Image (cartoon, grey):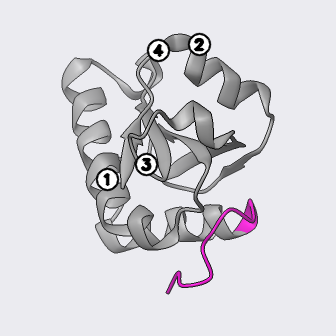
């Protein structure tokens, strides 16, 4: 079950952990959390962001929608419990084929060593 990162301080804690992997379509940041921090909202928490460098609000929102959908498909099977994740959109996020975005996310999680053993 996915919880959500909502506060800026939560995003900053993940960034401060300095564990990230950049793939062509996205960047993934990860941080191990204490089980008490999750507040019963799920096994892990996830947040999405897209900077102004991606373009206007329409492009940023489209990129975040695509990232949310990729995460919805991949993270329940692949995300390790007791972790916070931030997925950041890149310039190619909007144009990249969906199956490539899925592969990018799985690769990033594997490179960060924050996957479940059952991840396909």
> In the image, is residue 54 above or below residue 107?
above
Badge number at residue 7: 4
Quarter location, residue 9: top right
Q: As rendered, which of 27 and 73 lies closer to the eye?
A: 73
Marks 3 and 1 in Cβ contact (< 8 Å): yes
57 relative to 17 in the view: left or right: left
Residue drawn at x 52%, y 12% is 8
Q: Main secondary structure of the magenta part?
A: loop
Q: Please identify, in this view, whether the residue under mark 2 or under mark 3 is nearer the observer.
A: 2
Q: CA distance from mark 2 to mark 3?
A: 27 Å
Q: Secondary structure at mark 1?
A: loop
Q: Secondary structure at mark 3?
A: loop
Residue 95, placed above or below residue 10:
below
| In the depicted structure, whether residue 34 falls above or below residue 118 | above
Taking the image as drawn, is residue 55 in sight? yes
Q: Is 36 or 56 nearer to us in this picture?
A: 36
How far across and down, in percent of the image, does residue 50 sit? 42, 28
Q: Identify the disc placed on residue 95.
A: 1
Region of the chain picked out in magenta, as a range = 111-120
Residue 92's disc is 3
Identify the residue position indicated by label 2 in the image: 9
């Amino acid at each position: 079950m996915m919880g959500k990162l909502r506060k800026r301080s939560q995003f900053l804690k993940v960034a401060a952990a300095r564990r990230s992997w950049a793939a062509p379509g996205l960047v993934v940041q990860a941080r191990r959390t204490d089980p008490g921090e999750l507040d019963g909202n799920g096994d892990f928490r996830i947040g999405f962001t897209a900077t102004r460098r991606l373009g206007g609000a329409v492009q940023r929102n489209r990129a975040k929608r695509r990232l949310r959908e990729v995460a919805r498909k991949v993270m329940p099977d692949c995300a390790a419990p007791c972790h916070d994740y931030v997925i950041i959109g890149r310039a190619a996020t909007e144009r990249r084929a969906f199956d490539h975005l899925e592969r990018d996310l799985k690769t990033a999680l594997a490179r960060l060593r924050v996957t479940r053993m059952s991840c396909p």
